[in-house]
Image: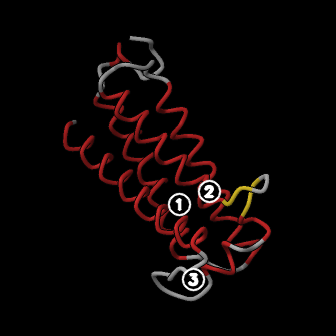
Amino acid sequence: MKNINKFLFILILIEIIISSYIAYSDFSGTIGKCITGTQCNDVQNSVYGQIFGIKVSLLGLIAFIILLIVFMLDQSRKIPRYVLPILMLIGTLVALCFIALQLFVLKQICTNCFIIDFIMIIISITYAFSLKSIDKNKRPWSTD
């Protein structure tokens, strides 16, 4: 279980690092580099690149920082056990929506964004499988 928690922690840190790079590129006015391809700026500057006038890159960075904080609080049992699974479910649904937007609406792929979304899905799947090793009396929705 500790190895899984370390793996999840590292994946969340990777999310923060990549999101920081994208947010920095957005706000510094520099053109960010795609890991592969050249469509990152087109996707990030599309109509879907902002929500309520706030860049998705900044919202993503904030979301992953919150995820890291909640993950650490969950590990120290300072929050109810249902908070992290709910947050991961929301993150996965958002990631799936952004992947669908890129593939079916924009018909362009931002590889940086795709990697972030893919890692979020991996985080959620890994966490879900780790729940199987928790004692049946200590499910994540219990308040202990």
Secondary structure of the residue carrying numbered label 2: helix
Q: Position of residue 115 (x, y in %)?
A: 48, 68
Q: Which residue is mark 1?
A: 117
Which numbered disc covers residue 96?
2
Q: Identify the mark nearer the N-term, 1 or 2.
A: 2
Q: Position of residue 135 (x, y in %)?
A: 29, 20
CA gap between label 2 and label 3 equals: 25 Å
Q: Residue at x 78, y 56 (%)?
A: 53
CA gap between label 3 and label 1 equals: 21 Å
Secondary structure of the residue carrying numbered label 3: loop
Q: Residue at x 68, y 75 (%)?
A: 43
Say which amino acid is labelled 3.
Ile
Which numbered disc covers residue 31?
3
CA gap between label 1 and label 2 equals: 7 Å
Q: Identify the mark nearer the N-term, 2 or 3.
A: 3
Secondary structure of the residue carrying numbered label 1: helix
Q: Is residue 5 left or right of residue 41?
A: left
Determine contact: label 1, label 2, CB under 8 Å.
Answer: yes
Quarter residue 129 falls in: top left
Say which amino acid is labelled 1.
Asp
Q: Quadrant of the C terminus?
A: top left
Say which amino acid is labelled 2.
Leu
| Residue that lies at the very extreme toward the bottom in this rendered image | 38
Q: Identify the mark nearer the N-term, 3 or 1.
A: 3
Which numbered disc covers residue 77?
none
Determine contact: label 3, label 1, CB under 8 Å.
Answer: no
